[in-house]
C-alpha cells in the first residue's frame, strides 16, 4: 500500500488484474460452443501491458497454454507496432511457431485504450474443435497437413469484421458452426477483458500499466530467483527414449541443466533431429514444459507472468524434435512436450528428491479421437482426454487419475454419448496400478468403449487415434519406489503394439480398452506405514495379493 | 424517549419510558456471556410504541435463524418486531430454538396458539457436511462407473501446487461403499440393458450388513432421460429396508454430467437422515409448547418451503445460510423503496455479495460447498475469503495481503485479548479509531494496545506508519470486496452504479462507505440491525415450489402446444404441492421461464415467458433471449440457432412487503436533533489524517436527522463509519441512508 502518494498500489491492481483474467475465462466457458472449451477447459486468458508483457493470467486455464502466453505477447507487438493498433481491432493467429506449437490453438487479441493511448492487450487462446487438415492423424509428415495456418492478421479492423478471413476459416474447418462459435466466444472474452482493463485505468487515472507491470514482473522474478537459488549449483544431465509410430529407432530427448546462483539454463543438445511425424515440439511449447516443473518446485503459489521466465534460459538445437523448423508436423507435440517436463522432473528429483514426485502416469496425457460415420453417412468424432496416476510425492501418495502437469478436464461420459454413438462400457480405477513406495503412486484408470450398434454405418470401420505413452517404459519410482503400471491399449482383449501415437481400427461389436498407467512410487515400500496399506486395501486401491507382494502385508 | 432496561429484566412490557412506568414492546438484543448463565447486558434500546392494551387477536410470525455462534429469533406482529440473540446449542440445536421461541413469546405477550407462521433457517445440513457428521452413505452406480465420484473431473484447482489434496468428495462414499449395478440407459433414453433387480437387493444387503450404511444414493447414467431404473431401485429398497433413506439422482438433480449429478445426489443422501431427524424433533418440541403452525424452511434458492418438501430434498438447504442474509438485505432495501440492490454481508471469515433486480434475488445453478460442486438453485452469490477476522500478511513478493486465513472466533483478532497476535481487519479498525473498544458487540472489552502491536508488526515489514498500514489493510480488504461486487454485477450485464448497496453483518457498515466510493455507488443502506438481518429476512421470504422439465428442442422445431402442455403440467403439480402445504390457492402467483442457449452451447440463460404463449410465443422468447445474451455477454448473433433446454415454473406466494417498523425499527420522530455523545480521533487516510470524529449512538438519532462525515454511529451489533464528505440521514423506516458524493477519487 502506497498511502503516501495516494496512487493505486500493487496490492489492489495485481489481484484485480488476475480477477479480470479469471472472469475472462468464465465468460469463455459460458459462451463457447465446443466440448474443448466447455467440458475440457483447454484454454487460457491473460492481460498484457502495451509492450506485450504478460502481467496477469487466469488460474483456470490449461498449463500448456500458460507457459506459451508470455512469449506470444512479444510476437504480437512485433507484428503490430503500437502506433498501428486501433480501438476495435481484433488480432488472430495460430502459427505454431508464434503461438502454441499446434494449429488447433488459436490466439485472439483485443487492445485496451485509455484516453486514446494504447495501454495493453487482453489475449486468450483456445484449443479448437477443428482447424482443417487431417486432424488428429498420427501420420502427418508436414504442418501443411494439419490444417489452416493463420499468420498474425486482423480479424477486425477498427471494429469492422474481416469477412474474407471469416469466410476462409469457415470453408476450411469441420464443424464450422462450433469453430466459429468458439471464435466468437473468444472475441467476446477479449472485449470483456479489454473493457475491464480500460475501466481499471480510468478508475485510477493511470496513463498506462507500465509501472505496475514492471513491479509485478520484478517481484515475480525475485520469487523465482529465490527458489532457484535454493537449488545447489551444478550441471545435471538426463536423457530419455521416445517411441514414435512408424519410426524404427527410438528417438532421444536430452537435457542438461546448469544452475548457477539464481539462474538456470536448460540445454537440449543431444536431442534427436525432427521427424516426419506430428510429434515435433516447436520451441514455444518446449519452453512451457521446461518451465512448468521449475515453477512447481521453485515458486508454486506466485501468480504466473512474464517475470517467472526471466531467470530461465533455454538452448535448443534448431531442427531437433524439441525445436523443429517449419514445416515440421507438430499436431501431437504434447507427446514430446510432456516428456520435457518429465526430464526436468527427473533432474530435479536428483537435485531435490524430497521436493518432487516420482514419474507420473499422467505424463504424457492420453488424448484421443474416435472418428466414424453414422448410418446416414454423417461423420462424427469423439474426443476425450484421459489421465493416469500422479507419481508418489514426498510425504503423500500420488493423486489418482489426474491431469498433471497438464491441467484440463475430461469430457463427461454423458456429454460424449449425447454427441457421438460411442458407448462407454466402463471407466474405473485400476487396483495395484500405482507403483509401490513409502508414498504410493496414484492409480491409473481404464476406459472401455464400443460402437453403439445400429448407430454407426455398417461396414465402415472406426478409427481411434491420438497420443498415448508409457506403453513400453512405465513411470519410474523415486528414492527406492517401484514403477507404476504400463499403459495398454487392447481390442477384444488383444493388446496392440506399444506406441506413442496409436491408430487403431475397429468395428461395431469390438471392445476397445485403454488402460492408463499408474504413477511411480516415492521411497522404499518397506517404509510404508502399515495403516496406509490397510486403508488402501479397504478402499480397493491395492488387492490383497498386491499388498502381500509389494509391501509384505499379510491379512490379519 | 430513550428507555434503558435495567438488568435483570423480568418482562420487557414493564419498563420505564421517559421516567414513567409503561408497557412497551421493545426490540431487544440480549447477549449471553460465555461460560456462564444467561446474563443479559444492559443495552440501550428504543421503545417502539406504548401498548396499553395487549390484544392477542393479531397473528404472530416467528422466524429463527441458526448461525454458528448465535441463534437469532425474530417475532413480528402488526408491525411490531421483537428480536433476540441466544447462543446456539451445538449439541441439541432444537433446544436452543425452543428457548428462543419461548422468550420471544414472553416478550411479545403472544400465546403459542397465536403463531400463524414459523419460518426456520437452519444450518443443520451445512454443519453435518462441514463437520463430517452426515450419514454413512452407500452409492449405487451403473456397473463400470463405480468410481465416478472419485475420478471427478481430474482438473486441479491449484495449477502449480505439487502438494494439493484430492478434490472430489470421496468421503461421501469411499470405494468399499460403492456398488455397480448391471443396467444401462442410452443417451436417447432407450434401455440398453435392463436393471438387474437381484443385484440391487444383494448390493444393498451387503452395504447394510457389512458397511452399516444409513442411506443409499443412486445415480445411474442417463437417468434424467428415463428415471425408471432409479425409481425401481428406490422401491426395492423401500420394500426390503424401510428404515433406509434413499436419494435418487433423477429426483434430486435430473440434469446431465454424471460427476456433478452424483455429487449432489450423494450429498442429499448424506444429510437426509440428519435433516429428517432434526425437523421431526423440532416439530415435536414446537407442538409440545403449543405451536402448531406449519414449519417453513429456508432453501438455498432464497425461498421457503414446507418441512415435508424439504425433507424430500434436504440438499436444497445446504447453502441456505447466506440466502437468508441476502433476503434480509433485500427486505431492508425495499423498506426504503429501492428494488435494485446489492447486498453485502460481511462476516468474520468471509463475505457474501448478492444482487436483487426489480425486487427479485438473482438465482444461479452453480453452487459449491467446501470446494465441491453442488449443482442446485441457489441465490447467485460471490463469496470471498475476507471478513473482519481475516489476517493481514506480507507475501513473498512483498505484497500486503488480507485473508483467506482468519483468526476465527478463537483466538480471534489480537484486540480480543485472547492470545491472537496476527493483525486482522478488525484490529485495523480499532487502530484507526473506527470501533469503540469499550462498546463492541457482545460486551467484549477490546485491547487497543494489542491491536496496535499486531498492526505494527505488519507495518515494520513494509516501512509504513501503523496508521497508514491499518488504512492499507482496509484498502486491500475493501478492494477485494469491490472486485467481488463488480464481477457479480458486470458479469451479469449490470452496472453496479445503478444499484443501492445494503450493508449487513457486524463488520459491513464499517467498510460500506469506501466500497461504495470505489464502485461509484451513490446510496448505501444500513438497516437498523445488520447483525440479525438474516432472521428478519426469513419473515419476508416467498414461499415457492419450483419445478423444471428438460425440453431440449431447437427454437425452429419448438412446438407451441407441447410447450404449453409441459408448462401447464408443471404449474398444476406446483399448485397441488402448495395446496398440500396449506397455502391459499388464490394467493399463488406463477412465474414461467425457459432456460435457453445458442445451439450447442453448454450454459443457459433464463428467459421469463409471458403468462400465455401466443402464436408468436417462440419468436418473442427467442428475441428476449438474444437481448439478454447481448446484455450479459456484450455480443450475440441474430443468425445463430437458439434452443430451449429446460422449462421452469415457480409457483409462489410473494412475501408481505416490509412496512415501516417491521424490517426497520420505527424510528423516533421529534424536533430534537441528537447531539454526538462523544468524540474520538479516527484516521481517514493520508489527506484527511487524524480527525476529531463525533460519535453518535444510533438509538439517539431522530428521523431525518442528518450527519455529515466524518462521523461514527455506534450500536450494539455494529458500527457505521460515515467517511469524510459522506452524508447520512436516518429514514423513518429506521434505515440509515448514506449518500456518497462524487468526489475526486483515487488521486485522479
Image (cartoon, coloured by chain):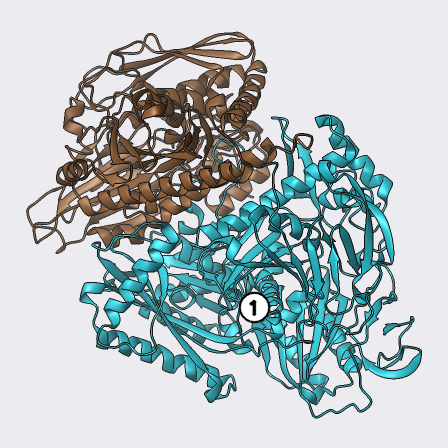
Chain colours: A brown, B cyan
- Please say whether residue B181 is visible from this viewpoint: no
Residue B746: give x, y in percent of width and height: 61, 38
Q: Is residue A506 left or right of residue B689?
A: left
Asked which quadrant contains residue A279, the reply is: top left
Foreground pick, B287 / B341:
B341
Residue found at the very far left of the displayed protein: A459
Q: How many marks?
A: 1
Disc 1 marks which residue? B273
Residue positioned 76% across, 38% down in the render? B689
Q: Is residue B214 left or right of residue B740?
A: left
Residue positioned 40% across, 72% down in the render? B547
Residue B170: give x, y in percent of width and height: 49, 50
Using the image, determine if residue B513 lies above or below residue A472.
below
Q: Quadrant of the C terminus of chain A?
A: top right
Q: Is residue B583 left or right of residue A142?
A: right
- Please say whether residue B512 is visible from this viewpoint: yes
Q: Secondary structure at mark 1?
A: helix
Q: Quadrant of the N terminus of chain A?
A: top right
Mark 1 neighbour class, 10 Å CA radius: few under 14, some 14 to 19, many 20 or more: many
Foreground pick, A508 / B444:
B444
Using the image, determine if residue B384 lies above or below residue B111.
above
Using the image, determine if residue B16 lies above or below residue A283.
below
Chain for disc number 1:
B
Residue positioned 38% across, 37% down in the render? A444
Residue B460: give x, y in percent of width and height: 76, 27
Residue B207: give x, y in percent of width and height: 48, 61
Residue positioned 61% across, 32% down in the render? A7
Foreground pick, B420 / B275:
B420
Asked which quadrant contains residue B287, the reply is: bottom right
Amino acid at each position: 500500500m502506497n498511502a503516501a502518494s495516494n496512487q493505486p498500489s500493487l496490492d489492489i491492481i495485481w489481484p484485480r488484474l488476475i480477477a479480470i483474467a479469471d472472469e475472462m475465462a468464465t465468460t469463455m466457458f459460458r459462451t463457447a460452443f465446443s466440448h474443448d472449451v466447455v467440458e475440457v477447459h483447454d484454454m487460457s486468458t491473460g492481460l498484457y501491458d502495451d509492450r506485450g508483457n504478460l502481467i496477469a493470467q487466469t488460474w483456470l486455464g490449461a498449463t500448456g497454454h500458460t507457459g506459451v502466453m508470455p512469449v506470444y505477447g512479444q510476437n504480437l507487438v512485433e507484428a503490430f507496432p503500437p502506433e498501428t493498433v486501433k480501438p476495435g481491432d481484433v488480432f488472430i493467429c495460430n502459427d505454431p511457431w508464434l503461438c502454441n506449437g499446434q494449429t488447433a490453438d488459436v490466439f485472439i487479441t483485443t487492445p485496451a485504450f485509455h484516453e486514446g493511448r494504447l495501454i495493453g492487450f487482453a489475449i486468450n487462446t483456445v484449443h479448437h474443435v477443428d482447424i482443417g487438415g487431417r486432424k488428429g492423424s498420427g501420420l502427418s509428415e508436414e504442418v501443411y497437413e494439419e490444417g489452416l495456418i493463420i499468420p498474425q492478421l486482423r480479424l477486425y479492423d477498427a471494429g469492422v469484421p474481416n469477412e474474407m478471413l471469416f469466410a476462409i476459416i469457415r470453408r476450411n474447418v469441420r464443424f464450422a458452426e462450433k469453430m466459429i462459435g468458439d471464435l466468437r466466444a473468444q472475441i467476446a472474452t477479449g472485449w470483456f477483458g479489454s473493457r475491464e482493463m480500460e475501466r481499471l485505468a480510468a478508475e485510477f487515472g493511470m496513463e498506462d500499466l507500465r509501472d505496475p507491470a514492471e513491479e509485478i514482473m520484478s517481484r515475480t522474478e525475485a520469487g523465482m530467483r529465490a527458489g532457484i537459488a535454493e537449488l545447489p549449483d551444478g550441471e545435471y544431465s538426463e536423457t530419455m527414449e521416445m517411441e514414435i509410430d512408424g519410426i524404427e529407432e527410438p528417438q532421444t530427448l536430452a537435457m542438461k541443466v546448469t544452475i548457477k546462483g539464481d539462474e538456470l539454463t536448460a540445454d537440449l543438445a543431444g536431442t534427436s533431429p525432427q521427424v516426419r511425424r506430428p510429434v515435433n515440439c516447436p520451441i514455444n511449447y518446449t519452453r512451457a514444459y521446461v518451465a512448468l516443473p521449475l515453477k512447481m518446485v521453485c515458486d508454486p503459489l506466485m501468480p504466473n507472468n512474464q517475470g517467472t521466465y526471466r531467470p530461465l534460459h533455454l538452448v535448443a538445437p534448431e531442427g531437433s524434435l524439441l525445436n523443429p523448423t517449419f514445416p515440421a508436423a507438430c499436431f501431437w507435440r504434447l507427446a514430446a512436450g510432456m516428456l520435457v517436463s518429465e526430464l526436468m522432473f527427473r533432474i530435479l528429483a536428483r537435485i531435490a528428491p524430497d521436493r518432487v514426485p516420482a514419474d507420473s502416469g499422467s505424463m504424457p496425457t492420453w488424448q484421443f479421437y474416435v472418428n466414424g460415420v453414422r448410418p446416414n453417412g454423417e461423420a462424427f468424432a469423439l474426443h476425450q482426454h484421459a489421465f493416469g496416476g500422479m507419481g508418489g510425492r514426498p510425504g503423500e501418495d500420488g493423486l489418482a487419475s489426474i491431469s498433471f502437469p497438464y491441467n484440463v478436464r475430461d469430457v463427461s461420459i454423458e456429454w460424449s454419448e449425447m454427441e457421438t454413438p460411442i458407448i462407454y462400457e466402463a471407466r474405473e480405477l485400476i487396483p495395484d496400478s500405482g507403483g509401490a513406495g513409502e508414498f504410493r503412486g496414484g492409480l491409473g484408470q481404464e476406459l472401455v468403449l464400443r460402437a453403439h450398434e445400429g448407430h454407426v454405418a455398417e461396414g465402415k470401420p472406426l478409427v481411434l487415434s491420438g497420443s498415448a505413452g508409457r506403453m513400453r517404459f512405465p513411470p519410474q519410482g523415486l528414492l527406492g519406489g517401484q514403477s507404476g503400471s504400463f499403459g495398454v491399449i487392447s481390442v477384444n482383449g488383444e493388446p496392440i503394439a506399444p506406441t506413442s501415437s496409436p491408430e487403431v481400427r475397429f468395428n461395431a461389436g469390438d471392445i476397445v480398452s485403454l488402460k492408463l498407467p499408474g504413477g511411480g512410487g516415492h521411497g522404499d515400500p518397506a517404509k510404508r506405514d502399515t495403516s496406509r496399506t490397510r486403508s488402501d486395501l479397504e478402499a480397493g486401491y491395492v488387492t490383497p495379493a498386491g499388498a502381500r507382494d509389494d509391501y509384505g502385508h499379510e491379512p490379519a | 424517549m430513550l428507555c434503558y432496561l435495567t438488568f435483570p429484566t423480568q418482562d420487557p412490557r414493564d419498563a420505564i419510558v421517559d421516567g414513567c412506568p409503561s408497557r412497551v414492546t421493545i426490540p431487544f438484543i440480549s447477549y449471553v456471556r460465555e461460560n456462564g448463565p444467561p446474563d443479559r447486558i444492559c443495552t440501550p434500546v428504543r421503545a417502539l410504541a406504548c401498548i396499553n392494551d395487549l390484544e392477542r387477536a393479531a397473528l404472530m410470525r416467528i422466524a429463527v435463524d441458526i448461525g454458528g455462534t448465535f441463534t437469532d429469533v425474530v417475532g413480528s406482529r402488526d408491525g411490531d418486531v421483537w428480536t433476540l440473540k441466544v447462543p446456539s446449542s451445538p449439541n441439541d440445536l432444537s433446544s436452543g430454538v425452543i428457548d428462543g421461541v419461548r422468550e420471544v413469546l414472553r416478550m411479545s405477550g403472544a400465546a403459542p396458539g397465536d403463531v400463524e407462521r414459523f419460518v426456520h433457517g437452519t444450518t443443520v445440513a451445512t454443519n453435518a457436511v462441514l463437520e463430517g457428521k452426515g450419514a454413512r452413505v452407500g452409492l449405487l452406480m451403473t456397473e463400470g462407473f463405480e468410481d465416478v465420484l472419485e475420478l471427478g473431473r481430474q482438473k486441479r484447482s491449484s495449477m502449480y501446487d505439487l502438494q494439493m489434496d484430492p478434490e472430489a468428495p470421496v468421503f461421501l462414499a469411499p470405494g468399499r461403499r460403492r456398488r455397480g449395478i448391471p443396467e444401462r440407459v442410452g443417451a436417447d433414453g432407450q434401455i440398453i440393458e435392463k436393471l438387474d433387480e437381484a443385484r440391487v437387493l444383494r448390493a444393498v444387503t451387503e452395504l447394510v450388513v457389512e458397511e452399516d450404511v444409513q442411506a443409499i444414493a443412486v445415480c445411474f447414467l442417463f437417468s434424467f432421460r428415463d428415471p425408471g431404473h432409479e425409481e425401481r431401485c428406490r422401491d426395492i429398497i423401500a420394500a426390503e429396508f424401510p428404515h433406509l433413506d434413499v436419494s435418487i439422482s433423477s429426483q434430486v438433480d435430473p440434469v446431465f454430467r454424471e460427476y456433478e449429478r452424483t455429487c449432489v445426489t450423494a450429498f442429499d443422501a448424506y444429510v437426509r437422515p440428519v435433516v429428517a431427524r432434526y425437523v421431526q424433533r423440532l416439530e415435536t418440541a414446537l407442538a409440545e409448547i403449543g405451536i402448531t403452525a406449519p414449519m417453513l424452511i429456508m432453501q438455498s434458492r432464497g425461498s421457503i418451503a414446507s418441512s415435508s418438501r424439504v425433507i424430500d430434498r434436504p440438499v436444497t438447504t445446504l447453502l441456505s445460510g447466506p440466502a437468508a442474509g441476502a433476503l434480509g438485505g433485500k427486505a431492508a432495501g425495499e423498506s426504503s423503496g429501492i428494488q435494485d440492490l446489492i447486498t453485502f454481508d460481511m462476516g468474520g471469515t468471509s463475505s457474501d455479495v448478492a444482487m436483487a433486480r426489480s425486487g427479485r434475488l438473482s438465482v444461479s445453478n452453480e453452487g459449491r460447498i467446501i470446494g465441491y460442486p453442488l449443482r442446485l438453485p441457489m441465490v447467485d452469490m460471490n463469496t470471498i475469503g475476507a471478513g473482519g477476522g481475516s489476517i493481514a500478511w506480507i507475501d513473498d513478493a512483498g505484497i500486503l495481503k488480507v485473508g483467506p486465513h482468519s483468526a476465527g472466533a478463537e483466538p480471534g483478532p489480537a484486540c480480543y485479548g485472547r492470545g491472537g497476535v496476527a493483525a486482522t481487519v478488525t484490529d485495523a479498525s480499532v487502530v484507526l479509531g473506527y470501533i469503540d473498544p469499550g462498546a463492541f458487540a457482545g460486551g467484549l472489552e477490546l485491547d487497543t494496545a494489542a491491536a496496535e502491536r499486531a498492526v505494527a508488526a505488519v507495518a515494520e515489514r513494509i516501512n509504513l506508519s501503523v496508521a497508514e498500514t491499518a488504512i492499507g489493510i482496509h484498502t486491500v480488504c475493501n478492494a477485494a470486496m469491490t472486485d467481488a461486487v463488480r464481477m457479480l454485477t458486470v458479469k451479469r450485464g449490470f452496472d453496479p452504479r445503478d444499484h443501492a448497496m445494503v450493508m449487513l453483518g457486524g463488520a459491513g457498515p464499517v467498510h460500506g462507505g469506501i466500497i461504495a466510493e470505489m464502485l461509484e455507488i451513490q446510496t448505501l443502506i444500513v438497516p437498523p440491525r445488520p447483525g440479525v438481518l438474516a432472521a428478519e429476512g426469513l419473515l419476508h421470504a416467498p414461499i415457492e415450489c419450483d419445478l423444471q422439465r428438460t425440453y431440449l428442442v431447437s427454437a425452429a422445431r419448438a412446438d407451441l402446444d407441447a410447450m404449453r402442455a409441459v408448462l401447464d403440467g408443471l404449474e398444476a403439480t406446483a399448485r397441488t404441492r402448495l395446496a398440500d402445504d396449506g397455502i391459499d390457492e388464490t394467493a399463488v402467483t406463477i412465474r414461467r421461464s425457459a432456460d435457453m442457449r445458442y445451439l450447442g452451447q453448454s450454459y443457459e440463460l433464463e428467459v421469463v415467458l409471458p403468462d400465455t404463449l401466443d402464436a408468436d410465443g417462440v419468436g418473442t422468447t427467442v428475441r428476449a433471449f438474444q437481448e439478454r445474451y447481448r446484455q450479459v455477454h456484450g455480443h450475440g448473433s441474430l443468425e445463430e440457432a437458439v434452443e430451449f433446454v429446460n422449462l421452469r415454473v415457480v409457483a409462489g406466494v410473494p412475501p408481505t412487503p416490509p412496512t415501516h417498523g417491521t424490517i426497520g425499527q420505527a424510528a423516533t420522530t421529534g424536533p430534537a436533533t441528537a447531539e454526538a455523545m462523544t468524540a474520538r480521533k479516527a484516521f481517514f487516510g493520508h489527506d484527511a489524517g487524524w480527525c476529531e470524529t463525533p460519535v453518535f449512538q444510533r438509538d439517539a438519532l431522530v428521523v431525518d436527522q442528518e450527519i455529515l462525515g466524518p462521523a461514527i454511529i455506534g450500536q450494539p451489533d455494529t458500527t457505521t463509519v460515515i467517511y469524510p464528505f459522506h452524508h447520512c440521514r436516518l429514514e423513518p423506516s429506521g434505515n440509515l441512508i448514506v449518500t456518497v458524493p462524487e468526489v475526486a477519487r483515487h488521486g485522479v
